[in-house]
Image (spheres, rainbow, N blue to C red):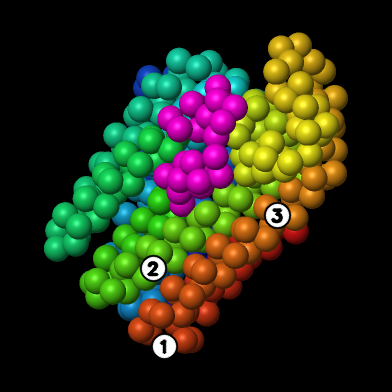
Amino acid sequence: MLKASECYKIIEEEISSIIFNEEPAGLYNPIRYILSIGGKRVRPCLTLLANNLFQDDYSPAIFPALATEIFHNFTLLHDDIMDNAATRRNKQTVHTKWNPNAAILSGDAMMIFAYDVLGKTAPDVFPKIFSLFNKTALEVCEGQQYDMEFEQRSDVTIQEYLEMIRLKTAVLLAASLAIGAIAAHASTAAIDQLYQFGLYTGLAFQLQDDYLDVFAAPDEFGKNIGGDILANKKTYLMISALNAGKPELVKKLNQWIDKKEFIPEKKIAAVTNIYRELEVEKKTKMLSDDYFNQGLEFLEKINVPKARKKELREFVFQLMTRAR
């Protein structure tokens, strides 16, 4: 059986073996850069581990796994422009190292390349994988659009937020798992159970990510702390704070949201203190844990020996315990 610790090495070796054209360098160097600066390779590892639940030979899942990782990194190039993010994985984002136009075009090329890699999937499972990949890619774009729209709204509800992160984050994790199962010719029930496992785990993961954006140490998180606060992103923390029923603190929070000129460090500190006073960090952790446990219930339902689930279970546990 494939060990979780081996997945990262396998994916890194596969990515390093990809040969891009040398010219034009302005198109391909940003792609090489974003793929070389690390990351946990969560999505392709999930694909390999899901495939390995049903068979020892994980090779049929390699190309779909690579495609999901390339697609994910393409979204980061564009997301970082929209979020005006300066760092990613403790490195400069592509649009700051080069420029926004380079990031847009290199991202476009990465999306095309992701489909090219996906096209190398075994013909007997390709149609089903291709259909899910397409559906997921569109949903990710929908989630990003909602995320941007929410920045301009003051009435975003918790349910709207949860639907946004389902689309933006959770569906790609869910699809990564389901694609691995499809490549292994797993049953329809098992594919759906893995998808649901990924969906709930993805919700938990994004809630934790929102929490860490405020409360983690920068060297643990891989990007600057407080970015969501500066961008007035309607995260679970902010929405919960705005609906906490504490008028004085809500008024202070709205004042910081409405300010056009401010010292970034002061805004981050002030909003973080409001969150602490309202104990929204505890609510965020509790909801994240609840979703994670619901996801594990779906993993337990999959009809394979318990021992085969060990590596996948340990992998997701490591993701959920980072910096806690």
Find the distance from the CA under tag 3 to the CA under tag 1: 35 Å
Q: Badge 2, how many Cα within 10 Å: few under 14, some, many 20+?
A: many
- Vertical relation: 215 (above or below) 125: above
Q: Quadrant of the C terminus?
A: bottom right
Pointer 3 with pointer 2, Cβ within 8 A: no
Residue 205 magenta: no
Picture quadrant where residue 198 is located: bottom left
Q: Nearer the viewer, mark 3 or mark 2?
A: 3
Which residue sits at x=22%, y=50%? 130
The picture places residue 311, in percent across and down from the top left corner, at 52, 75
What residue type is disc 2 on?
Leu
Instruction: Choose the circle earlier in sequence order: 3 or 2.
Output: 2
User: Is residue 118 or residue 6 the one in the foreground?
Assistant: 118
Of all residues, the one furthest to the top in this rendering is: 261
User: Is residue 248 or residue 164 the one in the foreground?
Assistant: 248
Find the distance from the CA under tag 1 to the CA under tag 2: 15 Å
Q: Which mark is residue 283?
A: 3
Disc 2 secondary structure class: helix
Check disc 2 and report the residue beneath it.
194
Q: Nearer the viewer, mark 3 or mark 1?
A: 3
Pointer 1 with pointer 2, Cβ within 8 A: no
What residue type is disc 3 on?
Lys
The picture places residue 180, in percent across and down from the top left corner, at 34, 64
Residue 165 magenta: yes
Check disc 1 and report the residue beneath it.
305
Q: Quadrant of the N terminus?
A: bottom left
In the image, the segment drawn in magenta is 145-170
Which residue sits at x=45%, y=74%? 299
Q: Nearer the viewer, mark 1 or mark 2?
A: 2
Q: Badge 3, how many Cα within 10 Å: few under 14, some, many 20+?
A: some
Q: Badge 1, how many Cα within 10 Å: few under 14, some, many 20+?
A: few
Prevailing secondary structure class for the magenta stretch in the rendered image: helix
